[in-house]
Image: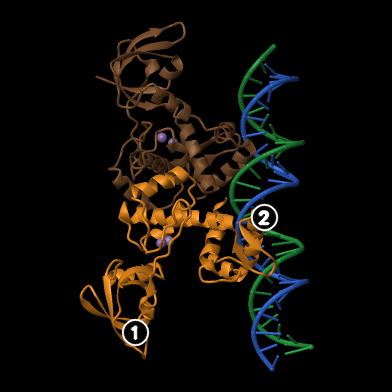
Chain colours: A orange, B brown, C green, D blue
DNA sequence: AATAATTTTTAGACAAATCTAAAAATTTGT
DNA sequence: ACAAATTTTTAGATTTGTCTAAAAATTATT
């Protein structure tokens, strides 16, 4: 598989998470910053190779083989992100770009050994799950802070938006994965929240609350 | 720079080590397992970009910029090889192929951090020197075992042929870098040698002796 | 249900990197 | 020095992945 083919497969995989129907040509084009006509061309090729199901004008979905392939790429991407943070002291806002390149390196042995070096991590630096060698993929139970009832308590386990600006914002305000959070108040007017984090009260906008995942204490 | 351009630059760099004159189109084509006409095309592009000096029919040589670029790629290749051996337990005959891919990853920070993680190694698993960040490149003083006078003693510091079959052969016979070697006898008839290594006498063919580098004790 | 807007596909073009076949230049051998 | 052999370049084709512009199909609106 070429880099380009892998990127398409990965994009379709991610789009399928929030979309039960076939993925549209336009959605893929927008995500990949390319033109719909280019997407159609590539989809035909992927369809030839049995990686996607495709009927004209009907959108596209991954085949079993396509899904397996996507999981392999996502696995590599996320393991490399862990490596960059854990072994090379990258911060979590710097890893994605480099992982986009590293995910295309072809060597099963390399990725198995890397997995071992990192002690078989289950989640990447952004809290996203890492598929196993066999393609098993367990999403953690987690909810957006913005969706929680008042007085819930939980642990910060992930981000929905993992763009560098958002991650830097979190760093700046000392919000990190693993921290205990309590939702104190919601301001209905603008959807902002008052939370307790690091034993400190803090006011966060709705935009922030809508991009932080918590695991709820039972 | 594309992967392909980088591969050409690196090939020319390696060919320049054993050739004072311009590097011929055919030599590049043979090394890269491609056709001379493809080489001509690429050379023109590299020349446009000021990476090589080129006059029709006169062979090619790296410019200062080209050499600097080549050193960067070689640095990355060799650092990744060290990483694979030191951190991921690859054997020295398995690293080259993967390093051929990894050398094209673009991230200055990545390579600097990798260098640090590995504690700034000076040589790769095959005994080849690793250029510094600034492109300094110190060849170690070393001689082929086959070129040494009888009764010289030295330490095995490198291999000329770093193909997997040769490296596996050395493994099989417990010959490794760092070992002390004494040249006991040379058989003029077939150019083979009797050496002492690991406190054991051993008979090695001329082919082996012509591909092992020793650093001579003073 | 007909028309308008949008989405998707097709047709044709282009840049990058390669190839084959043929032409041009250089090198070798007598 | 000249012909033969070799090397190198050119010309033209091919594949991959992309693009623009136009046609076709689908979806939304009145
Ligand atoms: Mn990422
Ligand atoms: Mn991630
Ligand atoms: Mn190598
Ligand atoms: Mn090496």
Question: Residue beneath label 2, please?
Answer: A48
- Drawn side of residue C8 relative to residue B78, left or right: right
Instruction: Identify the element where label 1 is drawn.
Output: strand
**Picture quarter containing residue A29?**
bottom right
Few, some or many C-alpha atoms within 10 Å of disc 2 (few <14, some 14-19, many ≥20)? few
Residue C19 percent across, percent down from the top left: 67, 39
Tell which subunit mark 2 falls on. A
In the image, B26 versus A144, the foreground residue is: A144
- The span from disc 2 to disc 1 (Cα, nearest Å) is 49 Å
Quadrant position of the C terminus of chain B in the picture? top left
Tell which subunit mark 1 falls on. A
Q: Is residue A121 above or below residue A11?
A: above
Q: Are marks 2 and 1 in contact (CB under 8 Å)?
A: no
Q: Earlier in the sequence, mark 2 or mark 1?
A: 2
In the image, C6 versus B28, the foreground residue is: C6
Q: Is residue B154 above or below residue A156?
A: above
Instruction: Identify the element where label 2 is drawn.
Output: helix
Residue C6 percent across, percent down from the top left: 64, 79
Residue furthest left as drawn: A199
Question: Residue beneath label 1, please?
Answer: A192
**Picture quarter containing residue A170?**
bottom left
Which disc number belongs to residue B33?
none
Q: Is residue A199 above or below residue D6?
A: below
**Picture quarter containing residue A164?**
bottom left
């Amino acid at each position: 598989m070429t880099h380009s083919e892998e990127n398409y497969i990965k994009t379709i995989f991610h789009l399928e998470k929030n979309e039960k129907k076939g993925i549209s040509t336009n959605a893929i084009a927008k995500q990949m910053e390319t033109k719909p006509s280019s997407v159609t061309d590539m989809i035909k090729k992927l369809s030839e190779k049995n990686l996607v199901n495709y009927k004209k004008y009907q959108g596209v979905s991954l085949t079993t083989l396509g899904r397996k392939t996507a999981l392999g790429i996502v696995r590599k991407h996320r393991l490399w992100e862990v490596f960059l943070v854990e072994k090379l002291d990258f911060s979590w806002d710097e890893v994605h770009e480099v992982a986009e390149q590293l995910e295309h390196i072809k060597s099963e042995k390399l990725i198995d050994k890397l997995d071992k070096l990192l002690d078989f991590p289950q989640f990447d630096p952004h809290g996203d799950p890492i598929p196993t060698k066999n393609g098993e993929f367990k999403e953690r139970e987690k909810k957006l802070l913005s969706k929680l009832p008042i007085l819930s308590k939980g642990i910060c386990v992930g981000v929905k938006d993992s763009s560098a600006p958002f991650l830097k914002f979190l760093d700046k305000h000392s919000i990190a994965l693993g921290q205990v959070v309590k939702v104190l108040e919601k301001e209905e007017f603008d959807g902002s929240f008052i939370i307790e984090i690091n034993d400190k009260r803090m006011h966060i906008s709705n935009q922030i609350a809508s991009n932080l995942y918590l695991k709820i204490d039972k």
